[in-house]
Image (cartoon, grey):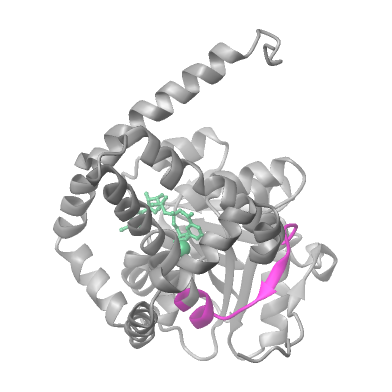
Amino acid sequence: MSTALPPLRHFELDDADPTLLAGRRVAILGYGNQGRAHALNLRDSGVEVVVGLREGSRRREQAARDGFVVKGLAEAATGAFIVMVLVPDEVHGEVYREQIEPVMSGDSHLAFAHGFSMAFGLVTPPPQQSTLLVAPKGQGDKLREAFLAGGGLPGLIGVQGPDPGESLKVALAYARACGALAGGGLLSSFREEAVTDLFGEQVVLCGGMVELITAAWETLVGRGYSPEGAYFECLHEVKIIADLIHQRGVDGMREGISTTAAYGGLKAAPRIITEETRRTMEGMLDEIESGDFARAFLAEQERGSPWLESMKQNERDHPMQKTGRRLRDFLRRCQLDGGTQDGSRRE
Ligand code: NAD
Ligand code: MG
C-alpha cells in the first residue's frame, strides 16, 4: 500500500458562509430520525424551515408540536431554496419523481443525507440540477445532542451539478446550520459516501464484527465456559477497545493494552482474517459497486422484508441475547447500588 498521503480535503466552520441561507427557505421532507434533528438545528441557526410530510403521516402532529409549518411533500418543496430529502432511502425514487421533480425550479438545490439513492440510480436528476450531499456521520438524536452542546458531528459533503463551486458553498452553509460541520467536514461524493458507508456497515460494523462476537461467544460456551463470562470477554469489552482505537488509532490502542493482549492479538489476527476472508471482502465490494446489493435490498423491501424480519427474529431468540439482557440488567443494578445518592461512588 502507498504511504504517500493525498492532501486532506476538509472543511471547518469558517469555510461556510451562513448568510447564504439568510431569507431563504429550506424544505425538510420527512420528520424521522434525521429530519427532526435537521429541522430543529436549522431553525436554531436562524434558517426558515418548512416540513414536508405525506397526508396522514403520524409525524405531522410531532412536527407541528415542535412549532413547524407542515405541508405536503410537493407543497413544501415548491419555492424552497434547498429541498432536503429525509425519507427512507428506498422511497427516494418515487418521492423524487412524483413530488419533487415537477416543482423544482432552476435555482433550487436538491439535497440528501446519504448517497445511496443517487449512487445507485433511484434518483437521476437532470444535469442542470444542483444536488448536494450533506451526510452527518451519526444518528439524528446524536446530531441534535452535539449541536445543543455547541458542536456537531463530522459530515461528508459532496455536490453534483452544473456549478460545483456554487453548490459546494450552499452545501457547506447547510452543513454548518444543521450541525454537520462543527465536527469537521470531509469532501466526498454521492458514490464514495454510499459505497464506503455500505461496505463499512456490512464488513465491519453490523456484519463482520457482530458475527465475530457471536461465533467467539458460541465457541467458548460450546466448551462449557459460562455464558456470562463469554459475553463479558467477547462483547462487553468491545467498547473499551473501540474507544481506545477511536481515540488513539490501532497502534495507540496496542500501546494501551497488556503485553499479553498485544502479542496474542497480533498472532491471532491473520488466522482469523485469512486470505479467503479478504477475497470475500473484495467480492462484497464488487456487489456494492455494481449495484447488485442495492437491487437485492430494494427487492426485499418490495416484498415487505420477510427475510430481514425472520433473521432479526432469529437474532432476538439467540441465547447470547438472553445472556446479554440478564448481564446488562445485573451490571446496571450494581452500578446503581454502588453509587450514593449524590452520584459519588461508595468506597
Ligand atoms: P426515518 O425512517 O427515521 O424517517 C423517515 C421519514 O420519512 C418519516 O418522517 C416517515 O414518516 C417518512 N416516510 C416514510 N415512508 C415514506 C414515504 N413512502 N413517503 C414519504 N415519506 C415517508 O429515516 P432516517 O433514518 O431519518 O433516514 C432519512 C435519511 O437520512 C436517509 O437517506 C438515511 O440514509 C439518512 N441518514 C440516516 C442516518 C441515521 O442514523 N438514521 C444517518 C445519516 C443519514
Ligand atoms: Mg451506514
Q: Quadrant of the C terminus?
A: top right
| Residue at x 39%, y 68% (from the top left corner) | 272
Q: Is 256 one of the magenta-colored residues?
A: no
Q: In x, y percent, where is residue 336?
A: 55, 15
Name of the residue lying farthest toward the right:
14
Q: Where 117 sits versus 227, above or below?
A: below
User: Relative to the observer, which residue lies in front, 98 or 184?
Assistant: 184
Q: In x, y percent, where is residue 303?
A: 14, 63
In the image, taking residue 34 as reference, residue 255 lies left or right, namely right
In the image, taking residue 308 as reference, residue 203 lies left or right, namely right
Residues in magenta, as a range: 181-195
| Residue at x 69%, y 78% (from the top left corner) | 168
User: Relative to the observer, which residue lies in front, 312 or 90?
Assistant: 312
In the image, taking residue 261 as reference, residue 57 lies left or right, namely left
User: Relative to the observer, which residue lies in front, 109 or 328?
Assistant: 328
Q: In x, y percent, where is residue 147?
A: 70, 46
| Residue at x 52%, y 75% (from the top left corner) | 193
User: Relative to the observer, which residue lies in front, 328 or 86?
Assistant: 328
Asked whether residue 311 is in view, the answer is yes
